[in-house]
Image (tube, rainbow, N blue to C red):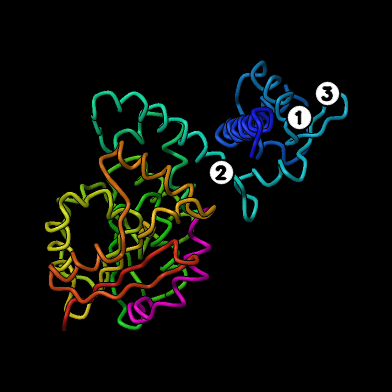
Amino acid sequence: MSTPDVMRQQAMQQGQGAMALALAFVGVTRGLFEALSTPADAETLAARANVDAGYVRRWCDAAYAFGYLDAEGDTFRLTELGEMYRPSTAGSLFPFAVQSVLTAHMADRASELMRTGERPGERVLGERKNILPWFGPMLEASFAGFFAREIVPALDVFAALDARGGTAVDLGCGNGWYLRALASRFANVRGIGLDGFEENIRHAEADTARAGLSERVRFRVGDLHHYTVEEPVELVAMNRALHHVWDRKDEVFAKLRDALKPGGAAVIWEPRWPDDRAQLRDGRRRAMAFQNLSEHVQGNHFLRPDEIEAAMRGAGLTPTTHLFGEGTEAVVVGVRPA
């Protein structure tokens, strides 16, 4: 049995971990880690990042304390840990910093709204102007590699799309990473991305232009409930977006079916909510449990694959579920009969 002193030490360690990630968030979002690609004093670093030197001095001291920086006199350089928070570093840890501050924001909102039961929807993601621009890059850094390594090779629907020279529509595309991944891998794939946040679309267009894919991949602002396609397409994707519109699932799946050509597929990627609550204590699923509270603030909740399959069948699609990440991720492919 843990004693109060042991539990106090655990709480202190958890608190310092939260501080460390909050400090990293400042360095990520203000470009301080990137600006320290070569050593600098606080004033030089502030000039490189175009921010206030007084804040930077305090940040450098804190980053030194938490092991992100080493110092020789007044000159700071990144440690190995600090290097891993540069967004340009392969396998960067910056998503953890962004997620930590988003978590604090959603906890504050949940605490406030719990008194009234209000569920204000997705607009809460845009309430913190420093978080929204990093939401798409956070998802890309967290999931693009997994998508390329695990999901694409396991599902023949993507190679079939390429063979047909088809078009994929990504509903709730964020910064467009999913379509860029497909278009980069498959030379005959075209893409159309739709998202409700104008800032996400701006980032998607800029990132796609830098990747040289703008001729095949384009984006537009739009509501998932009111999107249209000029003509039916071969694939419609929703990545961690279906639960945001689950309250109108019958309408959503009817529109998905109508947007598909015969033989086309709806590809739905969702976190897999477990059947057994005890699984939430698994270290791989604890974050999902908190995120489900965040989803409630937004008017949503995470789904089980059998719920998604049932909705697909109701719309006339033939579903198959594929599990990834030791069962924590589900991709449900619903084919419109030819």
Say whether residue 140 is magenta: no
- Give the mark, 2 or 3, whose residue is nearer the N terminus: 3
Looking at the rendered image, the disc whose residue lies closer to the viewer, 2 or 3, is 2
Residue kind at label 1, given as amino acid type: Tyr
Say whether residue 150 is magenta: yes
Q: Nearer the viewer, residue 7 or 111?
A: 7
Residue kind at label 3, given as amino acid type: Asp
Q: Secondary structure at mark 1?
A: helix
Residue kind at label 2, given as amino acid type: Phe
- Residue 71, given in percent of the width and then of the height, sits at 83, 30
Q: Is residue 130 above or below residue 330?
A: above
**Label at residue 96:** 2
- Residue 205, given in percent of the width and then of the height, sits at 38, 51
> According to the image, label 3 marks what residue?
74
Residue at point 46% right, 36% down?
A: 103
Residue range in magenta is 141-162
> According to the image, label 1 marks what residue?
64
- Give the mark, 1 or 2, whose residue is nearer the N terminus: 1
Q: Main secondary structure of the magenta part?
A: helix
Looking at the rendered image, the disc whose residue lies closer to the viewer, 1 or 3, is 1
Q: Is residue 141 above or below residue 259?
A: above
Q: Is residue 108 above or below residue 294?
A: above
- Residue 35, given in percent of the width and then of the height, sits at 67, 36
